[in-house]
Image: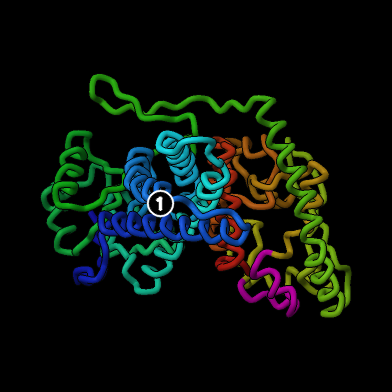
Amino acid sequence: MELLDGPTERPASGQLDSHRVRRLALGSDVAALALTLALVVGLGALLGRGPLSGVELLLFVASIPIWLVFGLLLGAYQLPGRALGWSFADDLSSVFFVTSVWAWFWLIGRAVVEAGPIPVLPSVAVWAVAILLVPSGRAVLRAGLRASNRNRQSVFVIGSPAGVGSVLPRIARQPDWGLDCVGSIRIEPGAPGAPEPSEIVSMVRDRGATRVVVAGWPADLAERTALLRDLLELGADVDLVASDPELLGRSSFLDQLEGLPILALSPRRLSRTTIRVKRAIDTAAAAVMLTVLSPLLAYIAVRIKLDSPGPIVFKQQRIGLGGAHFEVFKFRTMVEGAEQRKGEVSSLNMNPENQMFKAVDDPRVTKYGARIRRHSLDELPQLWNVLRGEMSLVGPRPLSVDEAVQVPDRYQARYDTRPGLTGPWQVLGRSDIPFEDMIKLDYMYVNSWSPRGDLKLLLQTVGVVLRPHGAY
């Protein structure tokens, strides 16, 4: 057993546990719904429509508790304060569902209490504005908690050496998750002197941990169950790291065999219709984005030309769908002939163990190139690759030829879908994520693909572009 030391002081009293964060989210939702009503009434006045009647206003106020009940029943409060990566994208999907159901109830209530025809526009306006304001209010709440340093949790990590070794770097790479590791225990399977569950619980209590991550418990099932039960009774949130995370997909679900929890897995199956729908969305969205962003694209092109000599667009061979080669388009961010100078800066490579070259202060990067790299604006020409059918808006990272040969055979399924302009690697940390972890992330994306997952990644991409990290 190896005990890794961490800060031993208890969390500051100002820190919030997950239950308090959920209550704050509930209060934020009430405020957002009240603001929704005010905006809809104001919009109606600007459009020359009559104000809502007193009965409609009272009905709206009376329906707010119904929204909160729907939110609790339909999972809108499961993530706040509990999920590691709670984000606007997570909130949007649950709020959309809850608000859609609730708006129908409000419309039906208006039809019941009022005589004559009922205008539908107020209900539609409330529905649309609430879908935007409720997640936005939660985003403001998260920002406030982050700024006040009250969204942090003290974490204790337990498990096998490999399990703990995979968790700790991920915690360090995601500072926005607000996790402070106050200690960890690495237990060798079969090694003598392994601590009893009661001893581990005492360590967790002494370190003041409010969250415990269990990553590969080497003891038997009964002992692990005892440990988890004692941790929960202590009041700590517990996260179990799945032993086969790369195989978990959207078709997996938790079942039971006479009370024994069973994680059911199904083979990955994407129908032709699903693939065609994804391609149609890619084509339409890429065409619209190229049109809307054309002034920005032209501005960046001019700045690149004025900044340094050389072509505006950089082309490179990448591996796409089915292992086919294609040329990826990017705005040039390096001096001309940078590829031939790679040997001069090899000592700066963050990934010397593989062909994925990334450097924090690469001297080949131009002054303006560094600026657009920071916000991934150099990737925008890949919208043309999407329009041509070589890439998708969301998908695995398009690998270079040198990188592709390092992908193990068991992860070749990443080539069963088109590479993406964005994806899990870009959203979760980009260059800060090692090559091996990137390959696993892409494999998991392919296994768990869903339209909802793509929408979430697209929304998270907006946040990453505005507040980037890991882009060099």
Q: Residues within 10 Å of mark 1 (few under 14, many from 20)?
A: few
Question: What residue is shown with label 1?
Answer: 54
Q: Is residue 225 above or below residue 457?
A: above
Q: Is residue 376 visible?
A: yes
Q: Residue at x 66, y 57 (%)?
A: 355
Residue 105 vs residue 155: left or right? Answer: right
State which quarter of the image contains the C terminus: bottom right
State how many labels appear. 1
Q: Residue at x 82, y 74 (%)?
A: 304
Q: Foreground: 428 or 324?
A: 428
Residue 208 location in percent, x, y?
19, 63
Residue 337 vs residue 73: left or right? Answer: right
Image quadrant where residue 339 sits: bottom right
Q: Residue at x 32, y 46 (%)?
A: 65
Q: Residue at x 14, y 47 (%)?
A: 233
Residue 18 location in percent, x, y?
28, 55
The residue lying furthest to the front in this view is 115
The residue lying furthest to the top in this view is 258
- The magenta span reads 360-376
Residue 313 location in percent, x, y?
84, 63
Q: Is residue 269 magenta?
A: no
Q: Is residue 370 magenta?
A: yes
Residue 53 vs residue 430: left or right? Answer: left
State which quarter of the image contains the N terminus: bottom left
> Type of residue at label 1?
Gly
